[in-house]
Structures are given as structure tokens and as C-alpha cells.
Image (cartoon, rainbow, N blue to C red):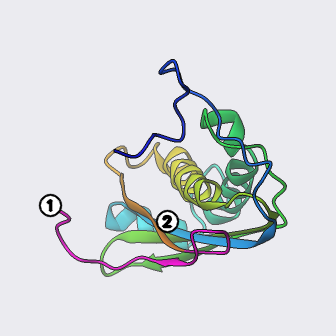
Amino acid sequence: MERLTHINEKGYAKMVDVTEKEESLREAVARGSIYMKKETIRAVSEGKIKKGDVLSVAQVGGIMGAKSTSVIIPMCHNINIYGADLEFNIDKENCKIDIIATVKTYGVTGVEMEALTAVSIAALTIYDMCKAIDKEMVISDIHLVKKTGGKSGDFYFRDLGSKC
């Protein structure tokens, strides 16, 4: 059985040592969705949420989330992020906002967790901005879409339905 990388010889949690890894250009893309009532989607798209421009605030929140990943995820390395961007697609037909985050760095470890955190924090920001009119919003389907760079190579999400 392969040894777990985040466990030391005594069985305690540890941060993986990446000092011997080679630097490379690394990119990760993650996505997720937040579902809401039709009235909420309409209010967001028409700029009628009292707290302000929901997607502008979520954009900043997502970027701040990416930059803060190592503070809130215990075993993540503190890395320099060289680029972080988010896209929002308002899908009125399905009453949801899709969130896509892209994060880039040049370094010895990837930015998958930073992209996933960016999507999560952007979705939570949207929830916070809209909760006064819709407490039944659902955040879902947060996942890694792709990652490039590093020793393990590239990864592209394949939706295979049930993973069991």
C-alpha cells in the first residue's frame, strides 16, 4: 500500500515537502453553481440587490479566497498566485449562476485548491449578498475542471455520472 503523503512516520498530519520539485507553469480551472429562486436571479441580473452589485463583490471575494487558501486549508502551501479570474454565467432557465475560476502560478506546487476555494468563496459571497430575499439557495457541483503543469501532468474532468 502506498504511503500517505500528508502523514508522517508517527501517523500525524504533516505538510508535504516540495523543496525538491521542479518549478513549472501551473494552471487550474474549477467550477460550481448556486441555485436560487427566479425572483432572486432576476434581482441579481437587474442589479436590484440592496447590498450592491452581487457579481462584482463575488469576483473580489473569489480572488481573495484564492489568495487566502493556505490560511483556511490546513495542508496547503502558501504560494504566489500570478493570476486569478472568475466568470459568472447567469442561467435564468435553470435558476442558477455558474461560477468558473482560473488560477495560475509558476512554482513547485499546483493551484487546484486555490481555484476550488475561489469558486466556493464566490458562491458563498453570492449567498451572503442575496440571503435577505432567498435563504433557500443551494451551492453545488464544485469540482476541478482541469489542471496543467507539474510532475503528475495534465488533468481534465470527465463527467462519468456515478463514480461508484
Left or right of residue 50: residue 67: right
Along the line of sight, the residue nearer the viewer: 128 or 85:
85
Residue under numbered circle 1: 164
Label the magenta part by its dominant secondary structure. loop
Disc number lying in front (1 or 2)? 1
SS label for mark 2: helix
Instruction: Sort mark 1 into few (<14), some (14-19) or many (20+) by Cα contacts within 10 Å.
Output: few
Question: Residue 67, image x and y in percent?
Answer: 76, 50
**Span highlighted in magenta in the image:** 147-163
Left or right of residue 113: residue 85: right
Along the line of sight, the residue nearer the viewer: 42 or 33:
33
Does residue 151 show up magenta in the picture?
A: yes
Question: Residue 153, image x and y in percent?
Answer: 58, 75
Residue 43 is labelled as 2
Quadrant in the picture for residue 53: bottom right
Quadrant housing the N terminus: top left
Residue 37 is labelled as none
Along the line of sight, the residue nearer the viewer: 136 or 151:
151
Instruction: Sort mark 2 into few (<14), some (14-19) or many (20+) by Cα contacts within 10 Å.
Output: some
